[in-house]
Image (cartoon, rainbow, N blue to C red):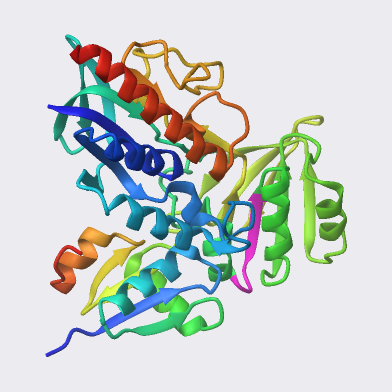
């Protein structure tokens, strides 16, 4: 079964855009939550990650804070590009 | 053994890598990340060839250009130390990996300056942030503080007053930002400015709950109840890796001459980590090119 991926981000954060672009380029479907306007998602993000920085990536419950390409590749099973 | 090890993959390091590769130097590019500070820049309008480009997009283009060449790239590795080994250098990453090269270019850039107060490190990312443009919207409807009095602090304030419940601005000195930014901030009705106040400490269990500030004139201490603290007090050079090896200036920048040579033969430096004036993407790229060409010349002499 495909992994459930959620990205918590803000519109202004360049690293969030980079993260989402990386997922798109690797054809990884994800749900995007704008924590600048979505208060429920914001609380979820803080609860799951225990911190308030964006982006936060939730891969089937595994939490990655920030754009960490090697870690994302590992968790998503993507080969080194 | 590499001919050349380049530490840092921002504009200086990546440009140096391309120049080194074109000289057929056996090169290692090692860095914590790709793009460095430029990744946090929304729009770039003064890098020639692009009238407008997003910072991270420009860095992706740099990276693509580097990857056209057969050089080794190791990312996710923060270099902790560069030391002399006979006529060569040893570059140690914080994860324990070590590499040797005949020459080294230090292009490790700068990072946000921390406040250096109790509670800051523990609550980093838990309300304490150094990227207001990234994390600002997370604090929508909350009370926040911005520390600093320069342009980046005022820019953060002007963004935050639109979304936060209240913004406290705390500056050690009178505001030094451009008048136009200060004037804009003064129009906000949810902003309180404390100038000539010092931050004493940041408190909170799991998340920031507030911070104490002290009036430099009267000595009076005030507690500000805030959920977010945006630290915008400038940058410091990532020069620890060559501390004790190369000469640094008073603010920790690596001293270089106009050919990017440091005080140590065979050790070069380029970009924001150096004392070369004007921290700009185009300047850093140019310095990276100079450093690689000089290193190439040095290596030729070494081999002959």
Q: Nearer the viewer, residue A25 or B190?
A: A25
State the count of labels: 0
Q: Quadrant of the N terminus of chain B?
A: top left
Confirm whether residue B237 shows in the render: no
Q: Nearer the viewer, residue A62 or B13?
A: B13
Confirm whether residue A80 shows in the render: yes
| Left or right placement of residue B102 versus residue B43 in this view | left
**Residue B197 at what x, y percent from top left?**
73, 37
**Residue B48 at what x, y percent from top left?**
59, 52
Q: Nearer the viewer, residue B194 or B29?
A: B29
Determine which quarter of the picture holds residue B167: bottom right
Please tell me which residue is depicted at 42% across the width and 16% down the height of the picture.
Answer: B262
Q: Nearer the viewer, residue B71 or B191?
A: B71
Q: Does the magenta run of residues contain B144?
A: yes
The residue furthest bottom is A1
Please tell me which residue is depicted at 38% across the width and 22% down the height of the picture.
Answer: B294
| Left or right placement of residue B257 versus residue B43 in this view | left
**Residue B178 at what x, y percent from top left?**
81, 46
| Left or right placement of residue B207 versus residue B8 in this view | right
Q: Does the magenta run of residues contain B192?
A: no
Which residues are the magenta region?
A: B140-146
Say above or below: B4 vs B66.
above
Say above or below: A62 vs B122.
below
**Residue A34 at what x, y percent from top left?**
49, 80
| Left or right placement of residue B115 versus residue A75 in this view | right
Say above or below: A7 vs B179.
below
Please tell me which residue is depicted at 59% across the width and 37% down the height of the picture.
Answer: B279
Please tell me which residue is depicted at 63% across the width and 52% down the height of the picture.
Answer: B46
Q: Quadrant of the C terminus of chain B?
A: top left
């Amino acid at each position: 079964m495909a992994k459930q991926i959620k990205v918590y981000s803000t519109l202004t954060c360049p690293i969030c855009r980079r993260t989402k672009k990386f997922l798109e380029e690797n054809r990884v479907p994800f749900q995007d939550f704008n924590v600048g306007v979505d208060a429920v998602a914001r609380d979820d993000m803080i609860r799951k990650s225990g911190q308030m920085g964006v982006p936060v990536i939730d891969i089937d419950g595994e939490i990655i804070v920030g754009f960490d390409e090697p870690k994302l590749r590992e968790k998503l099973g993507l080969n080194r590009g | 053994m590499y001919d050349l090890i380049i530490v840092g993959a921002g504009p200086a390091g990546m440009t140096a890598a391309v120049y080194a590769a074109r000289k057929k130097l056996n090169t290692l590019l090692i860095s914590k990340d790709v793009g460095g500070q430029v990744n946090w820049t929304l729009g770039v309008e003064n890098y020639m060839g692009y009238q407008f480009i997003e910072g991270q997009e420009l860095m992706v283009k740099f990276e693509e250009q580097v990857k056209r060449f057969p050089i080794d790239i190791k990312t996710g590795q923060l270099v902790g130390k560069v030391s002399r080994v006979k006529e060569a250098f040893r570059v140690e990453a914080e994860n324990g990996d070590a590499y040797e090269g005949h020459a080294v270019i230090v292009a490790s850039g700068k990072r946000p300056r921390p406040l250096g107060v109790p509670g800051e490190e523990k609550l980093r990312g838990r309300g304490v942030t150094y990227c207001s443009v990234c994390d600002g919207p997370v604090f929508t409807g909350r009370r926040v503080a911005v520390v600093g009095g320069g342009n980046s602090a005022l820019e953060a304030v002007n963004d935050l007053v639109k979304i936060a419940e209240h913004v406290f601005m705390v500056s050690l000195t009178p505001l030094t930002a451009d008048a136009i930014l200060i004037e804009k901030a003064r129009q906000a009705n949810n902003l309180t400015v404390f100038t000539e106040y010092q931050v004493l400490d940041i408190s909170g269990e799991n998340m920031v709950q507030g911070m104490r500030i002290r009036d430099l004139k009267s000595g009076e201490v005030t507690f500000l109840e805030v959920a977010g603290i945006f630290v915008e007090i400038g940058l410091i050079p990532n020069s620890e890796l060559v501390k004790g090896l190369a000469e640094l200036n008073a603010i920790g920048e690596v001293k270089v001459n106009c050919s990017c040579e440091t005080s140590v033969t065979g050790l070069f430096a380029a970009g924001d980590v150096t004392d070369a004036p004007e921290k700009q993407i185009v300047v850093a790229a140019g310095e990276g090119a100079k450093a690689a060409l000089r290193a190439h010349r040095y290596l030729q002499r070494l081999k002959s």
